């Protein structure tokens, strides 16, 4: 599946430092593919300990994790909704991603803040206000075009637009606003910025990773009201880790009292934010995590591997990591009658290990 998340933030909040660490990490496992597609798009592996659990029982040549596309979006300034700075580029780029990773500076330091001082909630308000203003502009223009159109579809969309404008005027981010299913469907073709899910990244000082300073506490309170998550990261530490080999990085993390890089938690949370989950295939050549949307049925999951698998889907053979740990091998899972045979209506569960039978 090709879904992406865009990293946004004001200038000098650590946005590009975090993006560069995500897309260049030597500390990633040697089997984890990662790359930068162009200067501001990277493909990042999704760390998943379940891959190693499977490998304990199914020996294989390589292990391939799921991956995410992350976009480093141009820094935003006040007035972006009216084209100030790189505003037009910023808004165009953010329309193309499926979710927003909002980097918020929560540390003091020598790096000059664009507004002269560190204030997490002021920064959040600046960016979210610009995105909501851009949405209001789009909605008002659309409403002018369709307000007098007599067809039912235009009337439905016009009513949905008025409802959205009322909420935006009240300062509501639209992703979790109270809309009917019909209103959401009517607004969907407009690709509204404030309809996107948000994950806040609190960029903290390296000495404050285990603490909750006032900036982080304020951000958490805002995020809770917005039904959004918060991940704490020290951009400086992540940058240093990305330049280390795996063994050196593990030692550094141990010294800091951390179990894993903050970017691992960030990647997993982004995966969840996009409504994604993984199923696995495991054979002699490779163990691989495949990405499907939550709620996908077996034929759709098969189609992620190849469109022929979906088109000619017959059934899926399914077992779990718990089955593997209990019976120690796939052969024993079959011998004990634990291998499940699932048809077209089967809803894939996160962590399923699957084989597909198909005929084209």
Image (cartoon, helix red, strand yellow):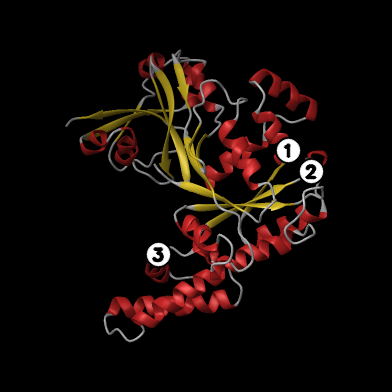
Tell me the SS state at disc 1: helix
**Is residue 35 in view from this perspective?**
yes
Q: Which residue is mark 3?
A: 188
Residue at the extreme bottom: 148
Tell me the SS state at disc 3: helix
Residue 97 position (above or below residue 251) = below
- Image spot of residue 158 (x, y percent): 39, 79
Q: Which mark is in front, 1 or 3?
A: 1
Residue at the extreme left: 360
Q: Which mark is residue 236?
A: 1
Tell me the SS state at disc 2: loop
Q: Are marks 1 and 2 in contact (CB under 8 Å)?
A: yes
Q: Which residue is mark 2?
A: 205
Answer with mark 1 or mark 3, whichever residue precedes in sequence. Answer: 3
Q: Tag 1: Cα neighbours inside 10 Å, few (<14), some, or many (≥20)? A: some
Answer with mark 3 or mark 2, whichever residue precedes in sequence. Answer: 3
**Is residue 173 in view from this perspective?**
no
In which quadrant of the rendered view does residue 294 lie?
A: top left
Question: In the drawing, does residue 313 fall left or right of residue 254?
Answer: left
Q: Quadrant of the C terminus?
A: top left
Tell me which residue sits at (59%, 26%) in the image.
28
């Amino acid at each position: 599946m090709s879904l992406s998340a865009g990293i946004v933030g004001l200038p000098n909040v650590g946005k590009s430092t975090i993006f560069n660490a995500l897309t260049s990490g030597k500390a990633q496992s040697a089997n984890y593919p990662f790359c930068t597609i162009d200067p501001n798009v990277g493909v990042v592996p999704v760390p998943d300990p379940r891959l190693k659990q499977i490998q304990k029982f199914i020996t294989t040549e390589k292990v391939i994790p799921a991956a995410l596309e992350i976009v480093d979006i141009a820094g935003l300034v006040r007035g972006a909704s009216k084209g100030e700075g790189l505003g037009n580029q910023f808004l165009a780029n953010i329309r193309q991603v499926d979710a927003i990773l909002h980097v918020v500076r929560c540390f003091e330091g020598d790096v000059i803040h664009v507004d002269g001082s560190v204030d997490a909630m002021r920064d959040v308000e600046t960016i979210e206000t610009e995105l909501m203003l851009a949405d209001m502009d789009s909605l008002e223009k659309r409403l002018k075009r369709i307000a007098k159109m007599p067809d039912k579809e235009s009337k439905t969309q016009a009513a949905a637009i008025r409802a959205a404008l009322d909420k935006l005027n009240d300062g509501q981010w639209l992703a979790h606003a109270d809309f009917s299913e019909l209103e959401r469907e009517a607004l969907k073709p407009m690709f509204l910025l404030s309809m996107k899910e948000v994950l806040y990244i609190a960029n903290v000082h390296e000495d404050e990773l285990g603490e909750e300073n006032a900036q982080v506490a304020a951000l958490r309170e805002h995020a809770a009201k917005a039904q959004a998550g918060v991940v704490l990261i020290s951009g400086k530490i992540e940058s240093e880790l990305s330049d280390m080999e795996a063994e050196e990085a593990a030692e550094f993390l141990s010294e800091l009292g951390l179990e894993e890089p903050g970017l691992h938690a960030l990647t997993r949370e982004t995966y969840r934010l996009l409504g994604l989950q993984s199923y696995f295939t495991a054979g002699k050549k490779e163990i691989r995590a495949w990405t499907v949307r939550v709620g996908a049925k077996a034929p759709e999951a098969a189609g992620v591997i190849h469109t022929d698998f979906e088109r000619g889907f017959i059934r899926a053979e399914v077992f779990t990591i718990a089955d593997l740990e209990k019976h120690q091998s796939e052969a024993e899972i079959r011998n004990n009658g634990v291998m499940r045979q699932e048809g077209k209506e089967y809803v894939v569960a996160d962590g399923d290990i699957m084989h597909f039978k198909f005929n084209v």
